[in-house]
């Protein structure tokens, strides 16, 4: 059996672990030795099956960002140590040290791990929802389609990153990259759907859809209330959390809410309302089918799960990737979204519109019907087979 490492380098949140956990658990069950290298050691530690996978801290660059509001993937990498060859060499060397006795790497947003694998001659795979895996092209595509993106600036950032990356690859005798998207060529497994891919220009690709993700175990009884049932997965640091909860309570929507680290005073404020706060992470696959609508922050996995369950959504993104997913969902017509910078957001009106306009629910059901024949188990099996074939 092989030693397989599961790597996460860039980004934040539990979603990176929920993406990697199913294939890591499946590989472990097949007798392989597996291990997590995680940017945040605490992320996803409470998910079912997560404790069975050893975890260590991932090598990461912690310096200050160099680009405000990055326009493309190249500018994102400039903010994570890909702007200076000696610093990047140190990052890749740290990954090489951790991977030197491994037979394969499976990553979710860990470009330096892929580069280390290239220099070591071991196979690596990127399991991605697409945001951090642009299609090949020079320059990598702009992310903020609604803002000017001067081609000269995009090319300059990509060329600067490529020069740094290729300096490191050349040092170890590995072939250079022509574009940033080439880093993922032949190793990308897209866990998304064309409707949610934030690069619509990607063209025909191997879309695996989502697999069953790591999830909690709680499935509380629904609270009483006259309105439609609402399932909410929220962040405690979301600035609009209090007014959002107030809008839910005012409409008397029976709501199951999971919010890690919520302020006890805020939780107490809504005691006795139609809102039930789950202390433990919920079993999304069991709770979603019982709900009528979903409110979340547009993480890819939650958005896709809600669509596959045919549930309309109110998406409240907190960062760029979530905002782009929100735009794709709104364009598809399966829900509404409120941008992070909107002042005095009217959550009550958004919830009322989501409830009143049946078109949102119908579009969500369209998505569910479109992918009703998609087998998550088959997708996972295909991914496992692809990794094991590379081992052979």
Image (cartoon, rainbow, N blue to C red):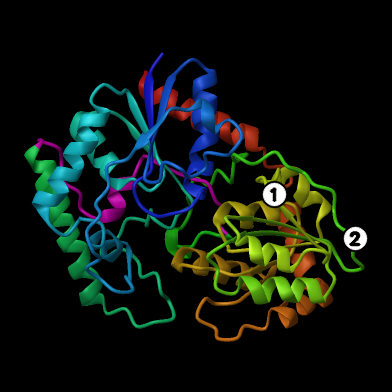
Marks 2 and 1 sit apart, C-alpha to C-alpha, by 33 Å
For this view, does 177 lie left or right of residue 196?
A: left
The residue labelled by disc 1 is 371
For this view, does 163 lie left or right of residue 319?
A: left
Q: Earlier in the sequence, mark 2 or mark 1?
A: 2
User: Which quadrant holds the C terminus?
Assistant: top left
Question: Picture coordinates of residue 325 (x, y %)?
Answer: 54, 64
For this view, does 40 lie left or right of residue 261?
A: left
- Say whether residue 290 is magenta: no
Dot label at residue 240: none
Kindly tell me whether residue 47 is visible in this rendering: yes
- The region drawn magenta spans 172-194
For this view, does 246 lie left or right of residue 85?
A: right
Viewer-nearest residue: 15 or 122: 15
Question: Picture coordinates of residue 15 (x, y %)?
Answer: 51, 49
Viewer-nearest residue: 129 or 289: 289
- Say whether residue 175 is magenta: yes
Name the residue rendered at 52%, 42% in the picture.
Answer: 44
Secondary structure state at the residue bearing disc 2: loop
In the displayed structure, 102 sits above or below 324; it is above
């Amino acid at each position: 059996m092989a030693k397989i490492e599961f790597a996460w380098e860039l980004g934040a949140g539990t979603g990176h672990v929920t993406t990697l956990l199913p294939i890591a658990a499946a590989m472990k069950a097949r007798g392989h030795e597996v291990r997590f290298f995680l940017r945040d050691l605490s992320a996803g530690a409470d998910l079912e099956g997560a404790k069975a996978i050893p975890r260590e801290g991932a090598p990461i660059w912690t310096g200050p960002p160099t680009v405000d509001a990055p326009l493309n993937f190249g500018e994102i990498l400039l903010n994570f140590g890909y702007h200076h060859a000696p610093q990047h060499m140190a990052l890749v060397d740290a990954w090489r040290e951790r991977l030197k006795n491994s037979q394969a790497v499976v990553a979710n947003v860990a470009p330096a791990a892929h580069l280390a694998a290239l220099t070591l001659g071991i196979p690596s795979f990127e399991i991605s929802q697409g945001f951090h895996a642009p299609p090949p092209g020079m320059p990598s595509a702009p992310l903020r389609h609604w803002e000017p993106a001067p081609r000269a600036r995009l090319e300059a950032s990509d060329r600067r990153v490529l020069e740094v990356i290729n300096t490191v690859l050349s040092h170890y005798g590995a072939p250079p990259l022509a574009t940033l998207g080439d880093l993922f060529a032949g190793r990308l497994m897209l866990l998304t759907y064309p409707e949610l891919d934030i690069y619509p220009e990607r063209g025909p690709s191997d879309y695996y859809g989502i697999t069953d993700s790591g999830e909690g175990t709680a499935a509380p009884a629904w609270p009483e209330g006259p309105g439609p049932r609402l399932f909410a997965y929220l962040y405690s640091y979301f600035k609009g959390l209090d007014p959002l909860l107030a809008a839910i309570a005012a409409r008397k929507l029976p709501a199951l809410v999971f919010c890690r680290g919520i302020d006890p005073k805020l939780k107490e404020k809504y005691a006795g309302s139609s809102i039930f706060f789950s202390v433990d992470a919920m079993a999304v696959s069991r709770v979603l089918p019982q709900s009528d609508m979903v409110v979340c922050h547009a993480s890819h996995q939650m958005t896709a799960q809600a669509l596959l369950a045919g549930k309309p959504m109110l998406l409240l993104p907190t960062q760029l990737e979530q905002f782009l997913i929100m735009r794709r969902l709104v364009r598809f017509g399966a829900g509404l979204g409120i941008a992070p910078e909107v002042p005095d957001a009217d959550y009550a009106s958004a919830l009322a519109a989501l409830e009143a306009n049946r078109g949102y629910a119908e579009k969500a059901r369209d998505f569910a019907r479109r992918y009703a024949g998609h087998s998550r188990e088959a997708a996972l099996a295909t991914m496992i087979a692809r990794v094991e074939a590379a081992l052979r």
